[in-house]
Image (cartoon, rainbow, N blue to C red):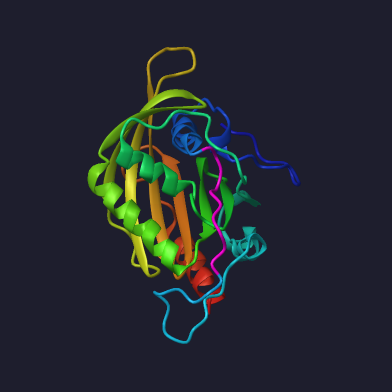
Amino acid sequence: MHRAVDPGEEVVPPFCFAKTSAAFLAALTILSAAGCSGGRGAANSVRAAGSPEGIAEKPLTVQNLKSLALTAEEVPGNRGVEVREAASGSESTFPPVSVTSCQTLVDFLRADGASASVTQVFNWEKDTSGGQSTLSYYGVDEAERAFQRVREALKKCGSYSGEGYAGEYTAHVAVSQAPEVGDEAVAFHEATSVKSLDDAESMTADSEYVCVRTGGAVVVFNKSGYGSDVKFPRQLIEKQVDRLDEAQR
């Protein structure tokens, strides 16, 4: 059982340090392969080819994205939500995962190529596994290309192995039904087996990823837990995507 978070205490993203629960280890291994960081590309401030004629693209900065993240009052049953800029300029110290198409997926999850990116961590009173979202801005053209890459990767990435802060792991990927939100969305479940830190038997946990593009912004929601029915709350997905959409109008 995780202790309650004291008021004002900094909440550290669960995937950036080792935890003993399998759900935390699963999130840790996948996102540590991505370096717990957002990629950085050049800001796109002109109208993208995918935007309607005559409508200027409105880039979103880190400060914009922070202000658009969900508040504690909007997240039922929470015991702490925090939003912070994704680490800039850091690269993963771990070797690439075993399958090239799966590395493309891992790169997408860390917002590789985004000009601005923030991460929000969710802690719920009755759910020790927690969750997170990553809000990123690419510009319409680059966001569309990023989504095309992840769609292609999901056609080929069935399973892979890698190394993260919690040690060696294997992951099995299964595409799932994405909610009908934003301009386009994909979703997948990942079952991750992590060798325990004391080299005892492996622990297995599940994660759901829901990836949504709206205009030049992309948001990735992640919920960890146990079983294929693990889901990030849909009402929070809809609220966050609507907010990102409105901010670009």
Camera-nearest residue between 113 and 219 = 113
Q: Answer left or right for 173 relative to 80.
A: left
Residue 213 placed where, x, y %? 42, 64
Camera-nearest residue between 143 and 234 = 143
Residue 88 in sight from this viewpoint: yes
Camera-nearest residue between 205 and 217 = 217
Q: How many marks?
A: 0
Residue 82 in sight from this viewpoint: no
Residue 209 placed where, x, y %? 39, 49
Instruction: Indicate yes or no whether the magenta region holds residue 43.
Output: yes
Indicate whether 109 appears above or below 95.
Answer: below
The quarter of the image holding the N terminus is: top right
| Residue for point 25% across, 39% down | 158
Residue 28 placed where, x, y %? 49, 34
Q: Splitting the image into 4 quarters, where does residue 48 fall?
A: bottom left
Q: Splitting the image into 4 quarters, where does residue 58 fall?
A: bottom right
Q: Answer left or right for 37 relative to 145.
A: right
Magenta segment: 35-44
Indicate whether 76 appears above or below 167.
Answer: below
